[in-house]
Image (cartoon, grey):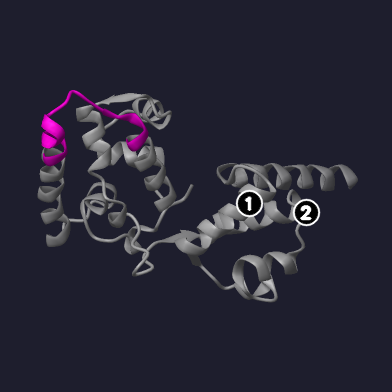
Amino acid sequence: MPGPLPDERPHGFVRMMLDSCECEVCEAAAGRQLQRVRELLAAEGRPSFRDGEAVAEHLRELHIAGLTDVQIGTVTGLRQRQLQALAGAPRQVRADLAARVMSVQVGEVYDPELEVGFESMTYVWALIDGLFHDGGLKESAIARKFFDINDLSSLGNTRRMNTKKVRNLERGYRRYVGDPEKAMALQKERRAAKRKAEVKAK
């Protein structure tokens, strides 16, 4: 799913890795990140393995905060197949892999206190489109239920949506339609089918 735009991501290790920010805050965060990894490796008497469920839960939190698997891989240095295996909540996880994941702070991705983190309206409209076409909800119901407005046309000039609101919209999409990560692909298919039908009708 699309995550926060670079200029809205909190300064820290994640922004340095994903957006190549070289400010003092981000550079200082790199040192703290290394220290966090060391502390995690030194915890609990240096066992070789850690609880796999805790690692999987942290990955879920990073996803909810707006990071994709590719971005998490960039930040942690882990391959996609390693992240997929960890997301499956294995009983035990190697301590070094667990430390790389657990050291990434959710607050460096999205800070709910500051309401930092925004997502593209392209993704938002794909979710709305899915709720209307596949979820059976009327436009007025979507507007009131998820945005506390009377008419979706009020969103016409909106360029970005706060991540907090998008998460609520995703929950609704998951309830009425299915996996929100498929929303944009399904919207693309609907548009292609519509164009094909229009061409055929001429």
Query: In the rendered structure, does residue 66 fall within the stretch colored magenta?
Result: no
**Residue at figure coordinates x 34%, y 26% from the top left:** 82
Q: What amino acid is found at the position of numbered circle 1 in the picture?
A: Tyr
Q: Is residue 117 toward the left or the right of residue 184 in the image?
A: left
The front one of 117 and 58 is 58
Q: What amino acid is found at the position of numbered circle 2 in the picture?
A: Gly
Q: Which residue is mark 2?
A: 136
Q: Is residue 30 toward the left or the right of residue 139 in the image?
A: left
* Helix, strand or loop status at disc 2: loop
List the single residue furthest toward the right: 201
Residue 87: numbered disc:
none
* Helix, strand or loop status at disc 1: helix
Which secondary structure class fits the magenta region best?
A: helix
Q: Quadrant of residue 140?
A: bottom right
Q: Is residue 196 toward the left or the right of residue 167 in the image?
A: right
Q: Is residue 135 toward the left or the right of residue 96 in the image?
A: right
Q: Position of residue 98 (x, y in %)?
A: 25, 33
| Vertical arrangement, residue 161 with respect to residue 81, above or below | below
Q: Position of residue 163 (x, y in %)?
A: 46, 61
Question: How many angstroms separate mark 2 from mark 1 (CA)?
Answer: 11 Å
| Vertical arrangement, residue 5 with respect to residue 105, above or below | below
Q: Position of residue 60 (x, y in %)?
A: 41, 42
Query: In the rendered structure, does residue 41 fall within the stretch colored magenta?
Result: yes
Residue 23 appears in the picture as rendered: no
Q: Earlier in the sequence, mark 2 or mark 1?
A: 2
Q: Position of residue 142 (x, y in %)?
A: 69, 64
**Residue at figure coordinates x 62%, y 47% from the top left:** 174
Residue 173: numbered disc:
1
**Residue at figure coordinates x 73%, y 45% from the top left:** 190
Residue 66 appears in the picture as rendered: yes
**Residue at figure coordinates x 37%, y 38% from the top left:** 70
Tell me where the magenta segment starts and ends, as one range: 39-54
